[in-house]
């Protein structure tokens, strides 16, 4: 229909990025700061009329210039991005985009997972992957307790990043575990924290070894990571946080149904306005779907709240006394080991 050409938009090309920004502004979205690969669709006159990008295994910034919409231009771009991602080793792909892109993405093999109230949709390219994930969670639960999903069990859940695992996390888990028969711990597995996922997971396990009614799960791709959730289609950060919370709540409700989880535990968040918004919307959405949401006051040392960010700052500034107060022995022991040196150096260098 048109003699259009797909080519990569290079970050070092100021002219191409200026044109990209103008196109995105026309469709009222912003350039995602996390893009690691982006393609453009160009006319013979070198006019950019459509674009699609990606960050790791998520597709982002899908946009078609208003004058060129409804002509099927998104499909070849998304197909090209998918091919590129497959060659980079990403087989399971996700996309956050506007609802107007639902039909063309379904035609390309994507399946709707969740929709936020503002019309943002969350999709993936594998039809049965979420069911496989749910069954994996179920199997992990049954291996710990063969009555884990019985009708009468009182089960709860916590989602934590633990960057690193602190005495505050341990306090939250201990309080929650005392209120339920079985507590599911979902450890955010996206590797965008200073402490790598494998380290965080091991520190959580070691730090909670004395609590016997726990089931440990990797969050996988379905419990959304704050570090990677795209915000390019919302007017401000608060709107992005609300969309993220709505999508995660919807996904979590499906997880809760499979595992017979009746309660989600959260810690209070007086330090971060963003996290406070997230917690509020998450609690509202969970309660709307029939789940209880219990918010537990954060543990303090004197008048100071224990937080992972305070711990990382103490590591950077060599405040060992703070670390002794805010960390369980297992985390402190790790930080004193040779294995922690690359992480400590990274924190000190501000990477």
Image: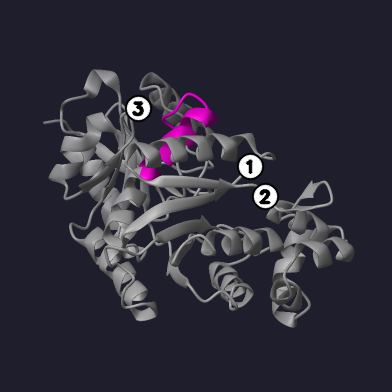
Query: Is residue 135 covered in magenta?
Result: no
Asked whether residue 38 is in view, the answer is no
CA gap, disc 1 and disc 2? 8 Å
- Say the numbered circle drawn on residue 269: 1
Secondary structure character of the magenta stretch overall: helix
Mark 3 Cα-neighbour bin, 10 Å: few <14, some 14–19, many ≥20: few
Magenta stretch?
231-249
In terms of image quadrants, where is residue 5? top left
Q: Residues within 10 Å of mark 1 (few under 14, many from 20)?
A: many
Precedes in sequence: disc 1 or disc 3: 3
In the image, which is nearer the foreground, mark 3 or mark 2? 2
Q: Residue at x 39, y 39 (%)?
A: 287
Q: Is residue 165 left or right of residue 242?
A: right
Q: State the mark number for residue 118.
A: 3
Q: Are marks 1 and 2 in contact (CB under 8 Å)?
A: yes
Q: Is the residue under label 2 in contact with that under label 3 (CB below 8 Å)?
A: no
> Which of disc 2 and disc 1 is earlier in sequence?
1
Name the residue beneath numbered marker 2: 298
Q: Position of residue 213 (x, y in %)?
A: 48, 72
Q: Position of residue 40 (x, y in %)?
A: 34, 38
Q: Determine the CA span between mark 1 and mark 3.
A: 25 Å
């Amino acid at each position: 229909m048109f003699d259009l050409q797909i080519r990569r938009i290079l970050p070092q090309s100021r002219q191409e990025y200026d044109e990209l920004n103008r196109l995105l502004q026309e469709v009222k979205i912003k350039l995602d700061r996390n893009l690691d690969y982006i393609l453009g669709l160009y006319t013979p006159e070198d006019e950019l009329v459509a674009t699609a990008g990606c960050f790791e295994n998520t597709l982002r910034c899908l946009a078609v210039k208003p004058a060129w919409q409804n002509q099927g231009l998104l499909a070849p771009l998304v197909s090209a991005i998918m091919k590129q991602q497959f060659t980079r080793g990403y087989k399971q792909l996700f996309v956050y985009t506007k609802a107007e892109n639902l039909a063309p993405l379904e035609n390309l093999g994507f399946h709707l997972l969740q929709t936020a109230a503002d019309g943002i949709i969350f999709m993936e390219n594998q039809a049965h992957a979420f069911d496989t994930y749910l069954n994996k969670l179920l199997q992990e639960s049954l291996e710990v307790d063969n009555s884990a999903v019985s009708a009468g069990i009182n089960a709860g859940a916590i989602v934590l990043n633990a960057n690193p695992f602190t005495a505050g996390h341990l306090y939250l888990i201990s309080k929650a575990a005392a209120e339920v028969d079985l507590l599911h711990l979902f450890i955010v597995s996206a590797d965008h924290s200073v402490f790598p996922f494998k380290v965080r997971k091991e520190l959580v396990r070691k730090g909670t070894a004395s609590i016997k009614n726990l089931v440990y799960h990797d969050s996988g791709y379905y419990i959304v990571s704050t570090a990677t959730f795209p915000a390019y289609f919302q007017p401000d950060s608060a709107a992005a946080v609300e969309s993220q919370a709505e999508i995660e709540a919807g996904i979590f409700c499906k997880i809760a149904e499979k595992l017979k989880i009746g309660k989600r535990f959260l810690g209070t968040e007086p330090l971060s306005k963003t996290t406070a918004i997230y917690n509020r919307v998450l609690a509202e959405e969970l309660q709307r779907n029939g789940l209880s949401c219990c918010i537990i006051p954060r543990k303090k040392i004197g008048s100071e709240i224990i937080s992972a960010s305070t711990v990382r700052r103490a590591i950077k500034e060599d405040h060992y006394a703070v670390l002794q107060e805010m960390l369980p022995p297992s985390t402190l022991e790790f930080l004193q080991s040779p294995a922690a040196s690359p992480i400590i150096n990274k924190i000190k260098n501000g990477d």
